[in-house]
Image (spheres, helix red, strand yellow):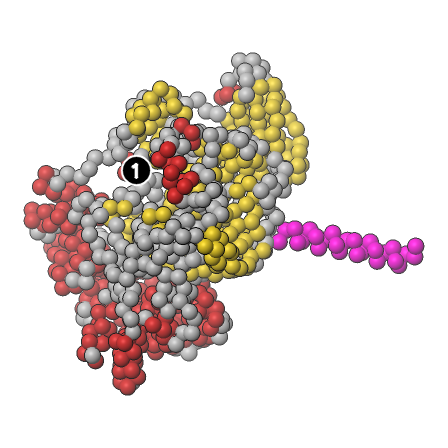
Amino acid sequence: MRPEKNFLQILFLAILLITGNCLKGQVKIWEEMLTLPTYEPKPADKNPMFYVPDAYQGAKRVLYPYPLMDNLSSEKSEQEHRAVYLENEYIRLCLLPDIGGRLFYATDKTNDYEIFYRQHVIKPANIGMLGAWISGGIEWCVFHHHRASTYLPVDYRLVENDDGSKTIWFGEIEPRHRMKWSIGLTLHPGKSYIETDVRMFNRTEHTNSILYWANVATHVNDDYQVFFPPSVNQGVYHAKNSFIHWPISDEIYNGKDYTGGIDVSWWKNHPDPISIFAYDLQEDFMGGYDHAKDAGTVHVGNHHVVKGAKLWEWGPGEYGHMWDCEILTDSDGPYAELMVGGFSDNQPDYSWIKPGEMKHLKQYWYPVRNLGGIKNANLDAAVNLAFVSDKFVKIGFNTTSLQDGCRIVLLKENKAIYETQIDLGPDKPFQTEIEVEEGTKPTQLTVRLLDRENRELISYQEKEQEYVSELPEVVSPPRLPEDIEQIEELVMTGQRIMQFHNPGYDPEDYFLEAIQRDPLNALANLHLGNLATKAGKYEDAAGFYRKSIRRITADYTRPRDCEALYRLGVVLKKQKKYDDAVDTLYRATWDQGFYAAAHFELAGISMLMGEYSEALDHLNRSLSMNSLHPEAHALKSAILRQLGDKENAGVSARRARMLDPLDHMAAFELLKEGSISLSEFEALLNQNKENYLELASDYFNFGLFMEASEVVALAVNSKYPSLRSYPSLRSYPILHYYAGWLNEKMGDKNLANSYYASGAAASTDYAFPFRFETLEILEAALQYN
């Protein structure tokens, strides 16, 4: 063979080898239609469903402005669903953007194990807040448990990252609160975990309460076991009204008999539906394991933020079997939910989010196999250590990436009794049984996994735990206002009722009782002002805020907390009393806690006055204290564009998009710059009428009527057909009224009248206006008619 030919063959083989390795480490992302047997609900109720006292998941069941979707169907047909896919060498996952962004399935390619419960049918039941709800995969419960839009389309965007990873971003602006959430699911080259980036944005001027839970479903059977971290020795029910020992119970729990030493970590030991939340989570993991399949699912998250872990199941009893094996699926069997919560450890359990604040957390899920259980887990690996007899222990490791040349060491009281070197990876688990001296106690053993640089990837040593028979005190229902003696307790009770959206009590009753006893009580008046503002009663709200301010500024005192000044300034702005609003908001900026929010509102007033340089100064001051505010960055982009600084306008829009990849204003600014196409912008807004109305409202609230008009024009001239659950953009009357009002504001009365007329002629089906801005627009339309 000639040397040249030999060299070329070697070079060709080398290129093939390199190319193969590169392809092996790639992440793929794409979307395509997925055909599934579907029991499609009948059209939603065309009548608005206003609030009547009712509970859902322990909180108020507020439906409006959503339609009721409880008219389900028993007819099944093959239907196509939009689906988005991510895949690397270990994981293939599928997300359904038109069914709430549900992570529909995720498959471990190394053994075909379904990491989450995989449905092969879309079969909704009347379980959701609006009605239709499906089981399986991961449901994203943002702001409320089983959020209202769990069966409605969400916005989404596919992103390829510089490090080779790829992300599906999806989310929505929630119309009841006008807050926003965006979640990114990422697969990395060479990693077997699913990274989940959760971002919640308070786009409003209010301090709101929120919760977040990922509702993770898994296939279960009699051999399925749930693993809370070893330090968890107590569980608790919803609202913390009943406690139980974990994992071995010997008490009545939520009215059910768990006496006699029942191991409640096993699915089979719960004959009826049950919830158990881990109490006082101290480690960063939880999971479940199918001993029959020798495979399971691990969740990892910073327990200081991802504080909640929960088992929920229908149970193997007759009632539960009817629900999870018959009503909710055709043939996919029973499931359990391994829920995990951020900024929350119970349901209901709400935290606060301030104006302009972004709350952020990360979670990770990955599959494990050939472990026999889970004793510890982190982002690198999972480990199990368990006695199988008096003389033998079983150890097992899974890693989330290839780890060549690892050392596994088993120690007894710091002395190595077993050591081996091995290559590990998601497709190369390790498990073995090791003989130990008879009489060895679990607490004497430590197992460690070290990488080739001798860095510890994970370890586990069982700790002695003292059994505490006494369980924590349960939460008591709130007393009636007149039965509470102390004013501070009275106000705090009302605040908790408001925070938890308690359906059985009215927080206003507690605040009114407080000011009856102490007319200038600062916190009670502040909360009454907030409730009045949310109801659009601005004059009443201003009166309450002024009473609060009288107390905190008595004797010419500079207040320590300027929230009441900030709230009053916002209300004065809504009343278009701009000089008074500016003076009041400036006083709120003296408090660092409201510096960013107050300057953001001041920027809005400056823009309404056409003072763009002044507005830019306010926004820069706001961003100096709250740089994680995408709305402020997007607005800064619009201001810079008005000032002719197109280069920095683009920079600000991209910063907004880095914080919120689904930010609508940032996308529109980039569209005007020419950086994204019209089709990309329209795809992001997802043919959702409320997305267009919200963006238009954002623009005209800052005096940018031309931009608002351009956004609405895109909607009313759209040629796209309607999505499921949405009327078409062209036929929605509120969009036409917005177009009429905006053109009237800009002086084109003929075009305004044309839009008012087309709005009046349009169908009112599913026309559920809810923004206070819309009141002025509808009043203008009434004058035309």
Q: In the rendered image, which residue does mark 1 sit on?
A: 238
Going 19% across and 66% down the picture, which residue do you hit?
Answer: 572
x, y percent for residue 555 = 11, 55
Q: Nearer the viewer, residue 496 or 38?
A: 38
x, y percent for residue 730 = 36, 73
Going 55% across and 40% down the picture, which residue do you hit?
Answer: 113
In the rendered image, residue 348 lying in the magenta stretch gets the answer no
In the rendered image, residue 4 lying in the magenta stretch gets the answer yes
x, y percent for residue 660 = 42, 60
Q: Is residue 140 visible?
A: no
Residue situated furthest top in the rendering: 438
Crowdedness of circle 1 by 10 Å Cα count: few (<14), some, many (20+)? some
Query: Residues in magenta?
Result: 1-26
In this rendering, would 512 be left or right of 37?
Answer: left
Mark 1: which amino acid? His
Residue 136: name its quadrant.
Answer: top left
Going 55% across and 37% down the picture, which residue do you hit?
Answer: 368
